[in-house]
Image: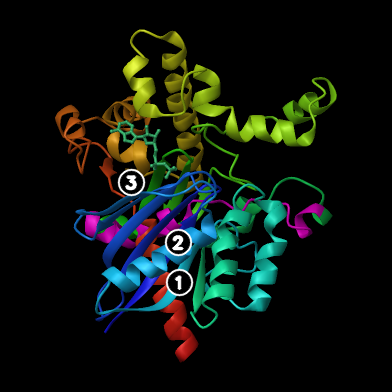
Amino acid sequence: MTPVCLVLNAGSSSLKFQVFALDGAGDPRRVFRGLFEGLGGAPHLLIWDGAGAAEADATFDEGFGHEEALLHVAAWLREHGSGLALVAAGHRVVHGGMAYAAPTRVDNAVLGALERLVPLAPLHQPHNLEPIRIIRRRFPDLPQVACFDTAFHRDQPELAQLFALPRAMTEAGVRRYGFHGLSYAYIASVLADTDPALAAGRVVVAHLGNGASLCALRAGRSVATTMGFSALDGLPMGTRCGSLDAGVVFYMLREMRLDADEAERILYTRSGLLGISGLSNDMRELRMRAAADPDARRAIDLFVYRIGRELGSLVAALSGIDALIFTGGIGENDAATRAEVLRGAAWAGFTLDEAANASGGPRVTTGASPAAWVVPTDEELMIARGTRAALSEAQC
Ligand code: ADP
């Protein structure tokens, strides 16, 4: 039997899953990937094999939730994964706080500690923990490993993690944690394949998806990032505002008389590209409309402008830049955003290679320029790697 781990990334109404074979000494090998959308309503399931061929396409009854989805995946794997033996589940968990700087085998104490972090990521952490609880209940013997989006940033210099707040607040956990760490850790792990010199160099990674942030890497380690205490900070995103003067929040509460939940909803779900354009959070749609619609154009322009401003800040933190890497749904696929960002970064010596950029790179700058690369991220592979590492550590 081939040992496999189930990698899970759970959202409020979605469950993304991938199955990785852990046989052999090489990287975990993707066997299946799948996605439930619309959980709680009448969800839709798609499953593909490791080569991308469709394996399942189904719709379920109203009220089918995360628990039913997980049980369905387990049953589907029993039926379709002949020769595969499920040995672990690996979970994307957004927040590991200060304590968790590496993938961690989940027991009662760990689960309790992760539940206490819910107030730090109220819109994500509860959904990430839900499948852990379900598996503990339904498959109590299956080892589970939590892999954290914050972990990669935990060894940043102290100053990069501090807010200028009273020390007691810092000690109570109000500090810059940073997110998208699984993506940055993956990119750091393939820097040497992209260009051997980069593994020791100064690199800014632009993870541009629905959520978006930048991270400064020196010799493959995070030294600064644009997200801070919450996943709201830094760049404007699909529906999140990005950096905001804290005074705006007081104004929303006091003068606009919004309650905290409503203010939070606006900043997380009605701002960013959607808020500025009034049209969509989806870059593809905004690009299609931008020529005719000034609101779509303005949303894109602000996104690119803010990337440029934050890039300058990270270049300062690194005292220079050897390469910029684009990843995430927009970074990997939207040549126009890459072109606009690189034109704005001409001050740092970047010169766009138009043809290479239009065809997706991987290198999208000319020979004389600092390099800019397109590197597809693979957060699920990082979770599979982390799960295997945590399991073998536990066996040592
Ligand atoms: P998430 O943060 O939810 O994982 P993704 O990394 O999948 O998000 O990125 C989603 C974003 O990528 C959306 O704004 C989408 O429009 C954009 N995107 C995906 N493909 C393309 C494309 N071909 N051209 C432009 N934008 C794209």
Which residue does the numbered mark 1 point to in the structure image?
89
Count residues near mark 3 (Cα–Cα under 10 Å), then give few for <14, some for 14-19, many for 20+: some
Check contact, mark 1 vs mark 3: CB within 8 A. Answer: no
Check contact, mark 2 vs mark 1: CB within 8 A. Answer: yes
Identified by mark 1, the residue type is Ala
Question: Depth-wise, is mark 3 or mark 2 nearer the camera?
Answer: 2
Which residue does the numbered mark 2 point to in the structure image?
8
Which residue does the numbered mark 3 point to in the structure image?
322
Q: Residue at x 57, y 67 (%)?
A: 134
Q: Position of residue 27 (x, y in %)?
A: 28, 71
In depth, the one of 78 and 379 nearer the eye is 78
At numbered mark 3, what does the secondary structure look like: helix, strand or loop? Answer: loop
Between disc 1 and disc 3, whose residue precedes?
A: 1
Identified by mark 3, the residue type is Asp
Residue extending farthest bottom: 396
Q: Residue at x 35, y 55 (%)?
A: 34
